[in-house]
Amino acid sequence: MCAKPISVADSGRWVRVCRIEALAGREIIPVFVAGRHLVLVQDGDGIFATDRACPHEGADLALGHCSGGRLFCPRHLAWFALANGAVSPGWNFPDLRTYPTRREGGDIQVLIEARG
Ligand code: FES
């Protein structure tokens, strides 16, 4: 089961998404940031942001799981490297889009590029 996404309406470069505590005990949370559906993924000490929809057939990656720096799609179990979105070997579809994150005070921020 997936919780309602945290919604952030403002846009810009570094966008505040949520408090760090929102990830407590949770591996993946869906967020809506500057008009984009993303997931925040906590893997060890790292916090990563990616598109929420799998680039294969659009499965909801908020329902996947992460392990060892990889985000696994719940539908066909392809995985993506959290560091750069690279898809696992043997699949022929685009990499997953990733977004830089940072901690600022007690917040998590995501770098959103302006749409051209
Ligand atoms: S929909 Fe994600 S691997 Fe197929």
Image (cartoon, helix red, strand yellow):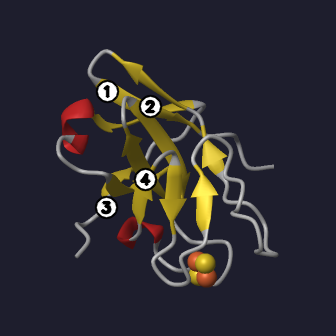
Name the residue at 51% across, 72% down.
73
Q: Amino acid at mark 1?
A: Asp
Please provide percent x and percent y for residue 87: 70, 62
Query: Could one spot residue 35 in this view of the protein?
Result: no
Of the numbered discs 4 and 2, the one sitting upstream in the chain is 4
In front of the other: 83 or 38: 83
Classify mark 1 as within 8 Å of ligand 1 or not, answering yes or no: no
Name the residue at 37% across, 29% down.
45
Name the residue at 22% across, 66% down.
3
Q: Amino acid at mark 2?
A: Gln
Is residue 4 toward the left or the right of residue 78 in the image? left
Q: Which mark is residue 5?
A: 3
Please provide percent x and percent y for residue 22: 21, 42
Is residue 112 toward the left or the right of residue 1 in the image? right
Name the residue at 78% across, 67% down.
94
Disc 1 target residue: 107
Disc 2 target residue: 109
